[in-house]
Structures are given as structure tokens and as C-alpha cells.
Amino acid sequence: MAPPGTTRLQRWENRAEWPLAGAALLFLGAYAVPIVDPDVPPLVHTVCSVVVVAVWVLFALDYAVRLVLADRRGEFIRRNLFDLAIIVLPLLRPLRLLRLVTLLSVLNRAGSHGLRGRVVTYVTGGTALLLICGGLAITDAERGHPDATIHNVGDGLWWAVTTMTTVGYGDTYPVTTTGRFVAVALMLGGIALLGVVTATLASWLVERVAEADDEDQAATRAQVETLTAEVRELRARVETSLATDRKT
Amino acid sequence: MAPPGTTRLQRWENRAEWPLAGAALLFLGAYAVPIVDPDVPPLVHTVCSVVVVAVWVLFALDYAVRLVLADRRGEFIRRNLFDLAIIVLPLLRPLRLLRLVTLLSVLNRAGSHGLRGRVVTYVTGGTALLLICGGLAITDAERGHPDATIHNVGDGLWWAVTTMTTVGYGDTYPVTTTGRFVAVALMLGGIALLGVVTATLASWLVERVAEADDEDQAATRAQVETLTAEVRELRARVETSLATDRKT
Amino acid sequence: MAPPGTTRLQRWENRAEWPLAGAALLFLGAYAVPIVDPDVPPLVHTVCSVVVVAVWVLFALDYAVRLVLADRRGEFIRRNLFDLAIIVLPLLRPLRLLRLVTLLSVLNRAGSHGLRGRVVTYVTGGTALLLICGGLAITDAERGHPDATIHNVGDGLWWAVTTMTTVGYGDTYPVTTTGRFVAVALMLGGIALLGVVTATLASWLVERVAEADDEDQAATRAQVETLTAEVRELRARVETSLATDRKT
Amino acid sequence: MAPPGTTRLQRWENRAEWPLAGAALLFLGAYAVPIVDPDVPPLVHTVCSVVVVAVWVLFALDYAVRLVLADRRGEFIRRNLFDLAIIVLPLLRPLRLLRLVTLLSVLNRAGSHGLRGRVVTYVTGGTALLLICGGLAITDAERGHPDATIHNVGDGLWWAVTTMTTVGYGDTYPVTTTGRFVAVALMLGGIALLGVVTATLASWLVERVAEADDEDQAATRAQVETLTAEVRELRARVETSLATDRKT
């Protein structure tokens, strides 16, 4: 996939990848701390807010640089709508956390082979991230509401798991509008998770069953090879015959 | 798919498509307004009722015209049972909303390529419509019942999402018979949604894995081509030999 | 599928099919009446009980006759374990209702083409039967229990739908042990339903995508045909040449 | 799969398989008894504790012996991480029960044919084990908590079923942290179950539909065979011609 002559955009993206992944992880930490412990000292709270803003600026800068370096800007924007969504909507706190997929794609690139292997890596990582971010976001949104059933991060993570697996006991559920939007994101993630698990298993089973089919095809090819050899032999014989005829 | 000599029925359907889509959207608006805000002034309420009836008349007229224009009427009725159901059952308010699939099929025709692309467009649109219509219908059905857990359109849409994703927390659930029928429609839609998401992913994975298989087949074909060239060469040689034999 | 020389067992099964289907339907009616209306007059109650027992005797007789007519009895028993389970366990009332699958298989045989068509027919019918029987059985099991949330057939059917679709709001749920066993049967049915819907869609999508693959194969076959014609022409030429050689 | 010259490691594993399976079953019994009946006499309680510890020692010894016998120890550890997890984490009681998969893999090896058959056996066994262990573990974890909704093994098993099928009524749900971890394991098991059921059905349907495709391929192969015969005939004719030419 990587062309031999890499463009300046590709070189930038390769160099920026790890720093941005680190920034995304930092963001998750800074986002998590005040939610996990709401009684954190004001200084820590301020530091976390600064980190959150700083990471946002970093991502925006990265997007701007890539846009400038891109050959065809219209196509670049169309192909990176998700990156744009992450930058443009900083006020929707839960959505901001999706920046972490940057980290995920880096991890993914490093260590997996084959299409299904990559799908499994991506889904496992994405599910874990979605659970953690969803659990944090719902706790932030619900805590403090008088009818809330989610009071701390433990409840939030438990709710995220019951939602993504579509079990939905109903012991914990969102009551705020923000919380319900977080829930919709997790439910969609859950349906995608179920779909990917099933599809990967189905693809594996179909491939195994299809292996016999491939052997049939190899047999056909072997037959064609035999036949080609036969025809070449015949042609050589005819050539010889013509040569001897000509001599006589 | 479109034959060069289009029939009068096809010309009618092409011309009627966009107006009917507009009418379906108008219907959704007129259906939604009195449910979203039950304290709407009586005049608006009356206008909405008139629009609902007018759209119904329009759809019935369209069906009648198409039936008259059809060559084989028995086959037309059999192939358009869904359209008939939408016309014949006007008293089942929630079912009436399914008319909007007309709008969907228009959107669908306009902008997507390939089978899976069309499936994804159709499912995304259908799911969104089903959620909106289900949320409106359940609010209309439940509001006012003493044991109701769904009191406004926000609750209705939230319930529709938890039902279609089969999460079902149990914080909101229908208590009226009409509401339970709406729920059954949404649950079936949810099972279909899950099925389509999974099947599309599985089909994509299977195809990617099968590409290696296709390359095998291309190799066989290339071999057969080589063999054919070999035989043609041989035949030319034999022809030459026969020609020289005859001359001598 | 039907061999020209039908055995006595097959003739019996063909002749017994429709009467047994009628008996199964009668059984469902007789089972339903006292559950739908618990205040039915004692005479009706007695008639229903008699019908239930009579249908059971009929099924047992049918099984006995088929066992006598079968060539290899060991194999017959092994291949008809489900029929045996229906006969031998008459005390497990809910399981008895599974006899109705007889009716289903008859309907199935009558009107559907292709593997996927048969699967869809079977699943739709089986789901409907499981819903109705599950709704009746749970009402019978739960009604009367002090903590019951299911009080009539309407509640029972609603609960059956929420269970089979795995939504499970929690507004209705079984509290008796019998009811929980009915629930397990419906949940398994629900998982099977979801699996079959998804698998049928996936199979359809895979087949459509594979059609291009089939065209490739047809192209290979056409090439081989061209080649065969070429070789036959060549052989005719050689034969002619040999014949003229011999003459001279 | 089994190479003719079995290593000492393989001989050990073959000999240890059945005793370890028995030990795993014993472990399940010893784990279950004090949970099913909490008022069991102190002596029985002590015996059960001893059995649980003894089985753990046995599994650890088996792992140690296999590690010593293995040729490449690094690879052995990497390929048997699951076995190691079972040994190293003895304090996480619910996880310990996963040792029973040993038993399952033995049963599996004994009696099933074909890939899908093995998948079905494995999933059915794994689901049953997960349900039983999950039901026991949740009862152990929840019973005694003031807000608990699960009070005995019957409730525990019922909760396990509603969780694995993702129905989640919400009549029973874990409130302790341990219980919630058990729940996560069961939910993951449930998603895997749904995925395997669907994937197996899809694979079966795809294979059935692909059989026509296989027939096409067989036709191609038959054609190539005809062609080969034709070419051999031709070559024989040419050889004869050359022989007669040489004689004259």
C-alpha cells in the first residue's frame, strides 16, 4: 500500500502519529481524573482542563498542517470527515473522546496480520475505548441529577457494559438528555460489535468449508497443465516430421 | 434495468415519484406536530388532520392510476401488496406512516452504487424512519394512560431506540395495546437491523477472503489461453505441412 | 426426493399427515380456551381436557404404527427422537404444544421453493407457533402466583414477544419455576430466530456477490469449449492428410 | 494431525487428559455443594475446601510437568496462556471454574465429525458450563448483600440464562463488584454464543447455495478431460503417421 516515493503529507503523518497518540492518551487521563474523583483539589482540576484544551489545539494544528500539505484538498477533506468532526465539535465532550481512535489505529498498524486479524484488533480496541469513554461520559452527565441511577464511575462502567451487550437490566439507565445521547452511541457500538463478532466467525467458517472447493480448482489447473504438456509434445513431434519431410 | 421502450405505467411512476415523496414528508410533519406539542392551537390541529387525509387520498389515487395503467392487473396487485396495505388500512395510524418508504426508495435510487451500498442506504434510512415514526406513534398511544411511562416525544424516541437495539432497560415500556403493537413493529425492525448489519459485514469479509480464490481462477484461465495459442500454432504448422505435401 | 417405489411407511405418513395436522390444531384450540377464559363453563373445560387427551392418544398411535411399519426400527427411533419426546413426556404441558410442528411441516411442504424460501417459511411459522404457545403456557403457569406480573393472555403474548426478541423490558417476567422453563425455551427460540434471519440475509448477499465469480467460471468453460473445437478441427485435418498419404 | 513419533509431552498429555477431566468435574462438585446448600455440615464444607485446593495443586503440577517436557519453553508458555491464567489466579474463584474447559475439550475430541459439528459441540458444552458456573458464582457473590436480588442457586441460574441470552429483564441483577465481573464474563459468552449460532447457520446456507457452483466446476473439469482424451488420440494418430512415413 505504501508507495516508494512518499509525499510530504505521508512523512508528516508518519512522524506525527506517535506524539498524537500520546496526546490522545493524555486527554483520556485528563478527562477521567475529575470524573473518577469529583473531590480532586482545584489545582488538579485546572491542570486537567488545560490539558484537555491543549490536546484539542494540538489535534486542530495537525489537521491544519495535513490540509496544507495535501495535494487535492477537496479529496482530503472528504476522506477525513471523521477527523474534522473531532476538531469542529469540541463542545460535545463525549464525542471529543473519539479522538482516541488515533491511538487505536497506531496500535493496530503495529501488530496484526491478515484481514480478520486486523478486524479483531480494531474491534477489541474500539470496544474497550468506547466502554471506558462511555462509562466516564455517562457518569459526568448523570451524577447530580435527582433521579439518577448512576452515581460513580463504577456504576457508569457497569451501565456501559450492560448497554453495549444489549442486556439492559434496567438497574442503571440514563435520565438526562446528554446521557441518552451517550447511550445511543454505545448501543450502536454494541450492534456493531455483535455484527463484527458474528461476521468474523462466519467468514472463518465459510473459508474453512471453501478450502475443499479450492482443492477442486487446483485439480482443474493440474489437468490443464498435463494437457498443455501433451500438446507441446505433439507439436514437437509434428515439427520433427516436417523437418524430416523437408530433408527428403 | 430500465428497458429502452418505457411503458405508460413506468412514465407515470417516474413522474409521480417526487411529488409522492414530498406528500409523504408532509404527512410525517402533519402527523408529528400535534404529537410533539399537544397544546397546539385548534386551527393548526385541523390543518394537520386535513393534510393527513389529503395525503391518504393522493396515495389512493396514485395506486388507482397505476392499477389502470398496468398491463397485467393481477400481477400488479400481487407485486404491490405493500402499497395496497398502506392504502386499505388508513385507520391503523402507525401503519400509515410506512407510506414514507416511498420517500426512502426515491432517496435510495438517487445516490448509491453496488448491492451492499444500496442495502446500507436502505437500512440506515429505514431505521431512522422507523425510529421517528415509532417514537411519535408510541407517544400518541401512551400519553394520557394512567400507568404510562412515556409522557412526551423525547421519552418516545428514547424508548424507540432502546427497543430497536433490543436493550430494553425497562425505564420506559408501552402499557396500551396500541403501544404494544408499535413495539412489536420496532422489535422486528431491530432484529432486521441487526441481521442486515451482520450480514453486510459478513458478505464483505467473505468477498475479501474470496479474492485470493478469484486469482486462482484467473490463473487457470491464463493457462487455458496459453494452451489455446499452442494448439493454434500447431494447427498452422500442420496446415503448412499439408499444403507443401499437396504441392509435391 | 420421493422415490418411485414408496414403502408402506411412506404411504401411511402421506395419508396420516393432514389428519394429524388437524388434530394438532384442535389440540392448540383445546389448550388455549381454558387459559384465555378461565371462567369457561365446566362442560367446556371437560371437553377441552378430553380433546387434549384424545390428540395425545392419536399421536401415540401414529408413532406406534410408524414404528411397526419401519424396516429398521433402531434407525427409525434414532431419526424420530423429537416425535418420541412429544409422546413420552405428556406431563410437561408446554412441551406437548410442540406437536404443532407437525402442522408446520405440512404447510411448509405445500408452498415454497428453494432452500432459503423453505428456511424463511419454517422460521416464520415456528416463531409464530412458539410465541402463541409460549404466551399461553406462561399465562397458565404464572396466573395465580401472588408476585405474578402476567395476569392474562394479552400479558402473556406481550411477554413472549419481549422475550423472543431479547428486549426484556422487565415489566413482565416469570416468577414460577415452570414459567422460567417456558422462558428458556422462548429465549433459545429468539436466539435461533436472530441467527436464522441474519444467516439468510448473509447467504443472499454472499450469493449475489458471488455471481460475478460464477461468470468468471463460465468464461473459463467457454474458452475450454473453443479450444476443444480447435483441437477437433486439427484432428480432422490430420486424419484427412493420413488418408491422402495412404491413397498415394 | 497426530504425528507418528509422539513426543514425551504428547504422551503425558494423552495420559493426563482423563484424570484431569475427572478432577475438574470433582472441582465443580466441591465448588457447588456449599453454594447450593449454605447450611451444609462443617465437615462437608471442609472436605469441599480441601478438594478445591487439591484440584488446584493437581492442575499446577500438570502445568509444571508439561513445561519441563516441552522442547521450546517460550513457545509452550505463549501457546498455553489460558492454562497459565487458570493456575496463576487462584484467588479469583469464578475464573477458576474455567478449568472445566479441560473436561469439555476431552468430550469434544471423543465424539464429533466435521468442522461445524465440532463447533456446535464445543459451543453447546461451553454454554452449559458457563451457565452453571456463572449461576453458582453469582449466588456465592450476591447472597448476603442487603440489596441482593439473587438469593439462591435457582435465582442464580435464572439470572445466568437471562444474561447470556441478553434478555436482561432486570428482576435479578448483580449489585456486588464480584457479581458484576461474573456478569461481564456471561455477557461476553452470550455475544459469542449468538455469533457462533448465526455464523454456523450462515456457513451452512452458504455451502448449500455454493453446491451448484461446485457442479459448474466439475463440468469444467469434465470438459478438460474430454479435451485431453481428444489430444491424446490426435497424438497417437500423428505417431502412427510418422511411423508409416519412416517405413516407406
Image: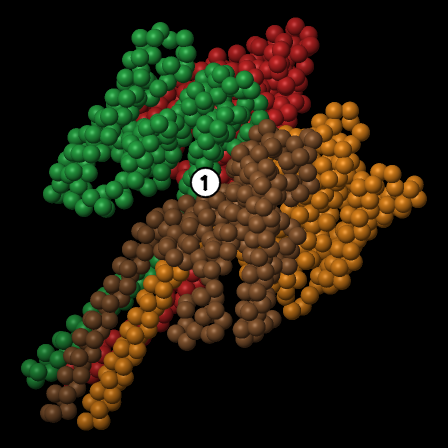
Chain colours: A brown, B orange, C red, D green
- Position of the N terminus of chain A, as image quadrant, is bottom left
Q: Residue A118 lies in what quarter of the image?
A: bottom left
Residue C3 visible in the snapshot: yes
Q: Position of residue B199 (x, y in %)?
A: 50, 48
Closer-to-camera residue (D42/B228):
D42
> According to the image, label 1 marks what residue?
D195
Tell me what residue is drawn at x 67 percent, y 43 percent.
Answer: A178
> Farthest residue in the bottom direction?
B248
Q: Residue A113 lies in what quarter of the image?
A: bottom left
Q: Position of residue D177 (x, y in %)?
A: 48, 28
Element class at badge 1: helix
Residue C168 visible in the snapshot: no
Identified by mark 1, the residue type is Gly
Tell me what residue is drawn at x 35 percent, y 48 percent.
Answer: A209
- Position of the C terminus of chain A, as image quadrant, is bottom left
- Disc 1 residue crowd, few under 14, some 14–19, many 20+, Cα 10 Å: many
Q: Position of residue B173 (x, y in %)?
A: 67, 30
Above or below residue B106? Residue B183 is above
Q: How many marks?
A: 1
Q: Position of residue C212 (x, y in %)?
A: 46, 61
